[in-house]
Amino acid sequence: MKNLYGYRRVDGKVGFRNLTLVMPSVACVNHVAELIASSISGAVAVHHEVGCAQIGADYQQSFRTLLNTALNPNVGAVLIVGLGCERIDPSDLAKEISASGKRVEFIVVQELGGTMPAVDAGKKIVIEMTEQLAKMHRQEVPFSSIVLGVECGASDFSSSLSSNPAVGYIADMIWQNGGRVILSETTEVIGTEEILAKRCINPAVATKLTDRIKRMVEYSKSEDRDEIEGLAIPNNISPGNVRGGLTTIEEKSLGAISKGGYFCPIVGVVDYAELIGQTPGLWFMDSPGYDPECTTGLVASGSTLVLFTTGLGTPLGNPITPIIKVTGNRLTAIKMQEDIDIDVSDILEDGASLEDKAAAMFDILIDIANGKQTQSEKLGYHDFGITRIGPRL
Amino acid sequence: MRDIRISFNDLLELSAKVLEKNGFPRSKSAIAARVLVEADARGIHSHGVVRLKRYIFEKNQGFIDPNAEPAILYETPVSLVIDGNKGLGQHVSIFAMQKCIKKAQTSHICFASVRNSNHFGIAGYYSELAQIHDMIGISMTNTYPLVLPTNGLQPMLGTNPIAVCIPSLAAPFNLDMATSVVPRGKIEVYQRSAKSLPKGWALDEYGKPAVNASKVIQNFNNHSNGGLLPLGGDGEMYGGHKGFGLAMLVDLLSAGLSLGQWSRETYTEKAGGVCHFFGAIRIDAFGDPYEIKAHVHQIIDKVCKSTKIDGREKIYFHGEKEMATRALSYRDGIPLPSELLEELRGLC
């Protein structure tokens, strides 16, 4: 097995990227954050639509997502860019981030006198931060330091039959080495409650999990169904899924849960973007199946790597965590090769074994953890979307 | 003398203030302070903030023009010749290295030869700048003449350091070495403690092994014969001619290509005239950058994990000790003599 090299942070967590994050505390200053990060090697800005005109659980979820994204160990230092009148106070965010020992500063655009003074001030801080981070180098770290998010999108028949089960082998391997895996997409585990409940380490975890699934079932039944060629399809399946051969949610879900391995126990259930605990094993994050929002949640929950299976092909990436895309569909592997990192189509096409493909996939995963760029990193994908609960004010 | 710890950022602020209060513009003071503090943070105190006084002296003597801006004299897509115009060495060098990196981003490689500059601090600071861009960085400089050519009696060459930084998957290979056996600073340490010098470091004015450190320093100051031995020592027995060759190489690349002053001609009349040489080479000019960095790391790792001699602590690779010291300094503060800090505060 290859050695794993990562960046050890002050709080002991291990990251596989060494980024300076420029984070707007409100959508109004997204562009300022982008201008600051755009010309600095090693800096990255996130673009989001929250930060103000939010209340209650919706506000808390947005705050938590921004905070926990900054706490992800792939991030070495953080600059918060505030506007000055928003609900999410940049100094509150900064205070909570600095409690982790991570370097953090904030600037406020209204106080600095507009875009250009803020960009100048921000650049100065971020250049200094990236220079400091550049002096930090990878060191050998144990496999137990991996927090792997698993996710599927644009699924088809091949996802269920090849790429998801192969990722499941990886999930088991990570757990056997003391690491953690996060499965999510509550929409896409509907119908597998009994199987998942049996894998939970205790009844409390099982009850929490099935309650969350039940809630999602109620919500997805609450609106009218779409129709394809005159037939109503379940709300939790996309038209593409149906065209790709997944006609019932059970079919889709049985494939989707295989990403979470076969043996590793489910050790806890967390809310969207909530930090997972320290116990090795499989964690479940209650989230929608919508890819950009789900991956954003996985990263905020602590994923430092994400294995993303896709049948029909999707180019998605994340600004902070490498999203490694796997397909089991040969046509997709050929048509969308610049978006696909791992092709496991020979499982269905040529009879290659799942174990062999999983072992090869693990090697690539380690290479990417060690610094090899993913296809979406090469192409500059920075997808970031925060799930909303309530209407805006 | 008692060492006290000062935080990295406090020392940075203090050093920049010292220069600013003594007639250097703010932006250039910050750059020079940065390079000096980096040296102290790595434990290379001979090239750290202790130099500030010297810079002020050299400014007052007219060697350094604090307001000078470097100018490009000649350029192609892969090369530059820069005139430092007597500016602060650090300012000129950052300018040159950044230009190299910028050109290498489009042309894959770029080298710059720089003349008419001044003392630039640690060579390794500049070679490291390329590393963040996945480039190999190269940095060299000539210096005040203290080193004897093999079989020669007159100091003709500087301690002419060579720094090369090669990106790796983990910490980079970060060579930063003088081409003499020891630097001047080491002789000064022996002078202060009145110890006799080991054979093989320096020769006296008759070409015999020097044992008296004070006498060697006196010879330096009087421009007398005798001086430091090149890497490998006296004669050819232990490869002294190879160290001499490396020192020559530095002078030819820095002063030769820029038509500048070579070591022996530096610090004459009213100009330091120091010459540098910089280079940046994109590693993806040779293939997949990740594969290359992984392979570089594997080579370093295998060398360091090879069998060591009984009783020796470990096999270090180049830059490893300095980076470990830097990490501690950044966390716990940089240890410096309290007298030095007092002196610096007095200069503000």
Image (cartoon, rainbow, N blue to C red):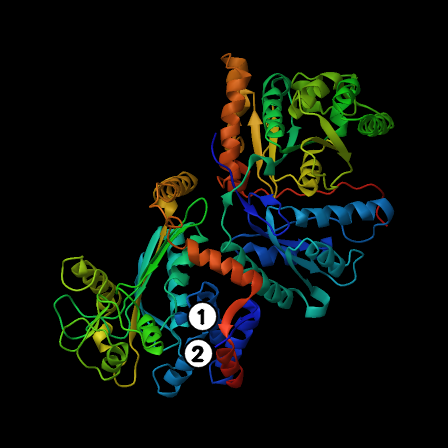
Q: Nearer the viewer, residue A142 or B64?
A: A142
Q: Is residue B184 above or below residue A379?
A: below
In this figure, which residue is indicated by the disc labeled 1?
A: B36
Q: Position of residue B311 (x, y in %)?
A: 37, 49
Q: Nearer the viewer, residue B36 or B262?
A: B36
Residue A32 visible, this orientation: yes
Can you name the residue that lies furthest to the bottom here? B60
Mark 2: few/some/many CA within 10 Å (<14, 14-19, 20+): many
Q: Dot 1: what SS?
A: helix
Mark 1: few/some/many CA within 10 Å (<14, 14-19, 20+): many
Q: Is residue A117 left or right of residue B87?
A: right
Q: Nearer the viewer, residue B90 or A337?
A: B90
**Residue type at the position of mark 1:** Leu
In this figure, which residue is indicated by the disc labeled 2?
A: B52
Residue A113 visible, this orientation: no
Tally of numbered discs: 2
Q: Residue at x 23, y 65 (%)?
A: B257
**Residue type at the position of mark 2:** Leu
Q: Residue at x 73, y 41 (%)?
A: A273
